[in-house]
Every structure is written in C-alpha cells, then in structure tokens.
Image: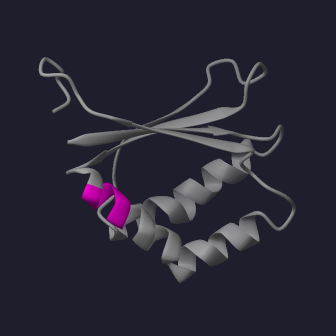
Amino acid sequence: MVYELRTYRIPPGRMPDILARFANTTMRLFARYQMEVVGFWTDARPEEEYTLVYLMRFADEAAQSAAWAAFRADAEWQEARRTTEANGPIVNEVISRSLVPTAFSPLQ
C-alpha cells in the first residue's frame, strides 16, 4: 500500500469553495477512478492557517500515478476547476507526500 498525504493551502475566504468542490464533484470523481480517501481534515485554528488535509490509499505507486492521470484528464474535473476558480484560485499551494506504512502500522 501507498498512502498520499495532501495538504492544500487555501486563500482567506475560499475554504467554503474548496469544500463545496470536494463535496459536490471531486469525491464522486475520486470514486470513478478508484481513488480511496482515508480521511479529510481542516485546521483546528483556521484563523492561523487555512489548510485542507486529506489522506488517500493506493495499491501501489503505479495505481497512484494512473489514477491521478485519469482524474486530471477528466473533462468534468477540468470544467469544475474552471468554474470554481472563475473568481480566482481556491488553492494557493498543494503539498503532496507519498508515504509507505511501517511493518507495525495499523494502516496496511
């Protein structure tokens, strides 16, 4: 298993927009491409940092790469991104880290 930890730094005032895009479009597209989400979190102190963090699970790095390529090429995703960013970006920065569980991790 490979886990991907993604952190999105969100511009002030745009958190409702990114949350809506995930809820209304992105999660459905993730399911379409067998992209398993383990969990989502927002910062407990949003006044200090506007972040959205989520963890995904893939069978291996090849599955991870293929899923992201298919997702990014999806016409519905491209349109959703275009329309939700019509008034400017809703993500300032994406930080992605691939993680491999240790032998003793409960997440295998």
Query: In the rendered structure, which segment of residues is drawn in magenta?
Result: 62-66
Query: What x and y, as percent, mark residue 25?
Result: 53, 66
Q: Residue at x 76, y 19 (%)?
A: 48
Question: Which quarter of the figure has residue 39?
Answer: top left
Relative side of 11 to 21, left or right: right
Q: Residue at x 53, y 55 (%)?
A: 23
Extreme bottom residue here? 75
From what the image shows, is residue 108 above or below residue 104?
below
In the image, 12 versus 73, the foreground residue is 73
Q: Residue at x 71, y 46 (%)?
A: 16
Query: What x and y, as percent, mark residue 93?
Result: 69, 43
Relative side of 97 to 65, left or right: right
Question: Which quarter of the figure has residue 106?
Answer: top left
Q: Is residue 63 magenta?
A: yes
From what the image shows, is residue 64 above or below residue 95?
below
Extreme left residue here? 103
In the image, 94 versus 52, the foreground residue is 94
From what the image shows, is residue 60 above or below residue 63?
above
Q: Is residue 107 magenta?
A: no
Quarter of the image with the N terminus in it: top left
Q: Residue at x 26, y 42 (%)?
A: 2
Colour mode of the rendering:
one colour
Q: What kind of secondary structure does the magenta stretch mostly adopt?
A: helix
From what the image shows, is residue 90 above or below residue 28?
above
Question: Which quarter of the figure has residue 9?
Answer: top right
Quarter of the image with the C terminus in it: top left
Relative side of 1 to 65, left or right: left
